[in-house]
Image: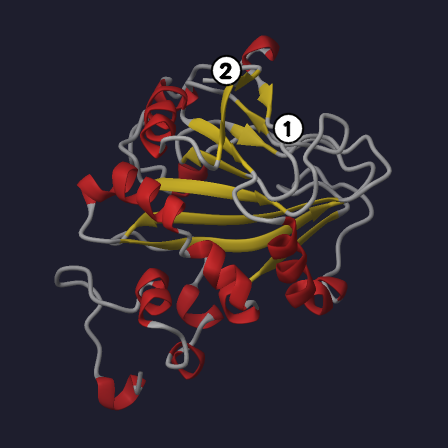
Amino acid sequence: MPTNTAIPVFQSSDDLNLVKEALDESGCAVIRNAQSLEATQTVKGELVESMGETRFQEEDSAEDFYPAKTQRLPALIARSKSAQRMATHPTIQSLCEHHLGDNCERFQLHVSAAINIGPGARKQVLHREEDAFPFFEIPRPNLVIATMWAMSDFTLSNGATLLVPGSHRWEADRQATADEIAQAEMPEGSVMIWLGGTLHAAGANNSKEWRYGIILSYSLGWLRQEENQYLDLPPSLAKNMSDEVRELVGYPMHGSLGFYDPRIAKI
């Protein structure tokens, strides 16, 4: 199994069971060339107008989670048919089922966002996707699995994501040392996957180019989603989506959770 520093790296043709094993062990992995360059250009084209309208701060504030010069565009399922295709990608769905399926009847889309990091942006503070659920003791059971699709090359200089392999098994008070932090270099069209308990952060962009990625994360079907999917994809839009997309967003009931009156929702 080839590696990029300590991050397991695979080709899209590799046995998916190896990726599942790597995620269990390292808490992160990269699949190179998971979609074609034509596909990445298509989704960027579908989002170009909305991204052009997305503002960002020029200067940092100590209170800001996202560094200055960071564009963040949510509600991708409503904005892009290609994002719908990416969110329901069979490889990612299989990984979600493997890592989340034991703790829920069905998993759901947690966050959808395009993230564009500009030249001069500082690195982000290491964090966990599951920090939104502090009432679970660390290390937590698998609550979230996240993906970052490379819409441009991710390089050491332009802020490729920082990952701490194995940190999904750490106790809460353990801090990562410099030699435990790896950087997920990957070409456009690749996808990075990490478990919600894995420490990660956006790297510093020391280049002259923007680093563009799409994050699609998934959570247990009985958790509150970080992105309010029912406002970003209201029934008036969801009724025109496929059953697969509606189910992924979280419209179906999960056990006894989520009942509604169809005379009002009309979906």
Quadrant occupied by the N terminus = top left
**Who's the residue at 40% across and 70% down the image?**
230
Amino acid, disc 1: Glu
Whole-percent x, y for residue 253 in the image: 20, 66
> Is 46 placed above or below 133 here?
below
Residue 55 in the image: state x and y as whole percent. 75, 60
Determine which quarter of the picture holds residue 17: top left
Quick one: 42 or 65, which is closer to the camera? 42
Image quadrant where one finds the C terminus: bottom left
- Which residue occupies 55% across, 47% down? 35
Front one among 119 and 184: 184
Secondary element at image label 1:
loop
Which is more toward the observer, 198 or 9? 9
Q: CA distance from mark 2 to mark 1?
A: 23 Å
Furthest toward the front, the residue is 13
Instruction: Give the residue number, with chain letter if any, for mark 1.
Output: 185
Which residue is at a point 67% across and 30% down the rendered structure image? 203
Which one is in front in this view, the residue at disc 2 or the one at disc 1? 1
Q: Is residue 75 visible?
A: no
Numbered label attached to residue 175: 2
Residue type of the residue flagged with mark 2: Gln
Q: Is residue 203 visible?
A: yes
